[in-house]
Amino acid sequence: MISVSGAVFSWLVLPLLIPFVTLPASIALILLTIVGLGYILYRFFSFHLFLAFIYQISFLLISGGIFVILLGALVQNEGGEHLQAWIFICSAYVVAWLVGLVTPGAPAGVGVRELILLFLLKGLLNDEDLLMAVVLGRILTFAGDLLFFSLSSFF
């Protein structure tokens, strides 16, 4: 379910890779995919699997949103208010996370996620801001994982 949920976000990255695909078409595809998969999971499997799918989609949206906020803090008034760019950045982060997850031999996708992010967002942002956000994003996710592990070990 983790991989399927991450793959759903690939629809939103299509306009970055294929210029004639529009953002509204990508949004329609992702919404149809979520509704369709949700229906299949609920109807043919179980309500709990459906909930797991929705929770994972929500988690990935929050993760991508945190990266967008981090990037927004780094980029000061460079047209950073543009919703379309933030949608691309959020979805590129999730797709990069997925590629890092499924890459064999790369623990926690180290290096892979960063490379994919740099590839997908090249030209959308200036290189210095993007590189800084990628590095800070990795540090932030490591700190979050460490905090979560520490708290769960405590309890």
Image (cartoon, rainbow, N blue to C red):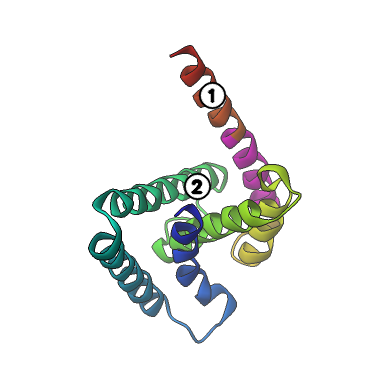
Q: From this viewpoint, is residue 148 visible?
A: yes
Q: Quadrant of the C terminus?
A: top left
Q: Earlier in the sequence, mark 2 or mark 1?
A: 2
Q: Three-letter amino acid code at disc 2?
A: Gly
Q: From the viewer's perspective, is 16 left or right of 21?
A: right
Q: Main secondary structure of the magenta part?
A: helix
Q: Residue furthest right?
A: 105
Q: Quadrant of the N terminus?
A: bottom left
Q: From this viewpoint, is residue 126 visible?
A: no
Disc on res. 107: none
The structure residue drawn at horizontal position 71% and vertical position 43%, both measured from the top left corner, is 107
The structure residue drawn at horizontal position 29% and vertical position 67%, both measured from the top left corner, is 40
Q: Which residue, given by chain and number where applicable, does mark 1 sit on? A: 149
Spot occupied by residue 109 in the image (x, y as percentages of width and height): 68, 48
Q: Secondary structure at mark 1?
A: helix
The magenta-colored residue range is 128-141
The image shows residue 66, relative to residue 104, as above or below, that is: above
- Front-lying residue, 124 or 144: 144
The image shows residue 155, relative to residue 143, as above or below, that is: above
Q: Three-letter amino acid code at disc 1?
A: Phe
Q: Which residue, given by chain and number where applicable, does mark 2 sit on? A: 72
- Front-lying residue, 115 or 146: 146
Q: Quadrant of residue 46?
A: bottom left
- Front-lying residue, 71 or 55: 55
Q: Is residue 20 magenta?
A: no
Spot occupied by residue 6 in the image (x, y as percentages of width and height): 49, 58
The image shows residue 31, relative to residue 76, as above or below, that is: below
The structure residue drawn at horizontal position 66% and vertical position 43%, both measured from the top left corner, is 108
